Amino acid sequence: MSFFGKILEKLGFKSAKAEPVPAPAAPPPAVTATTPAAPPPPPPPKPIEVVDVVAQLEKLAAANPQKLNWKVSIVDLLKLLDIDSSFAARKELATELGCPADLMGDSARMNMWLHKTVLKKIADNGGNVPKELLD
């Protein structure tokens, strides 16, 4: 499982499982020279499951004896999720998410980029991350 996958799992996102392809209901009509072949319609898109990320993180923060501010700190976010927040772990996550090379040498800039990117990717996967945290 990817590092980011661990974050999603801790937040309650269900892992996407491959579903079996349904068998066609009826055989397709025979194609003749006068009947153009139409491609089958694409399957309907699966709705994204919305996860109340804010409520989960606020609940974890309230139960934690440390004063962790997940809204501004990637370290605090990882600590709340009980995921390794060491510099090496954050660097691994930054590499996985495609952090620009010029930010990787500056831990403060990398952390800021990483925090914004993780929140955006959580939102992209159906998490309700407030807009002000994504800007």
Image (cartoon, rainbow, N blue to C red):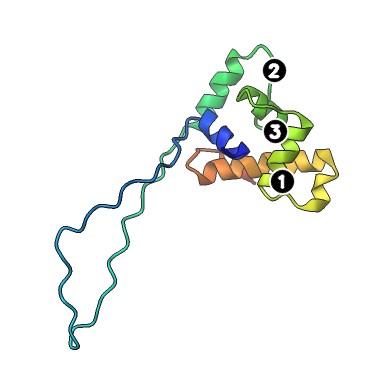
Residue placed most toward the observer, 47 or 36: 36
Mark pair 2, 1: CA separation: 28 Å
Q: Amino acid at mark 3?
A: Ile
The local crowd at label 2, few if under 14, some if 14 to 19, many if 20 or more residues have their Cα within 10 Å, is: few
For marks 2 and 1, the one nearer the N-term is 2
In the picture of the structure, the residue carrying the numbered disc 1 is 95
In the picture of the structure, the residue carrying the numbered disc 2 is 67
> Left or right of 51: which side holds 133?
right
Any part of residue 62 in sight: yes
Any part of residue 73 in sight: no
Q: Amino acid at mark 2?
A: Lys
Q: Secondary structure at mark 2?
A: loop
In the picture of the structure, the residue carrying the numbered disc 3 is 74
The local crowd at label 1, few if under 14, some if 14 to 19, many if 20 or more residues have their Cα within 10 Å, is: some
Q: Secondary structure at mark 3?
A: helix
- Residue at point 67% right, 45% down? 96
Tag nearer the camera, 2 or 1: 1
* Percent x, y of residue 58: 56, 23
The local crowd at label 3, few if under 14, some if 14 to 19, many if 20 or more residues have their Cα within 10 Å, is: many
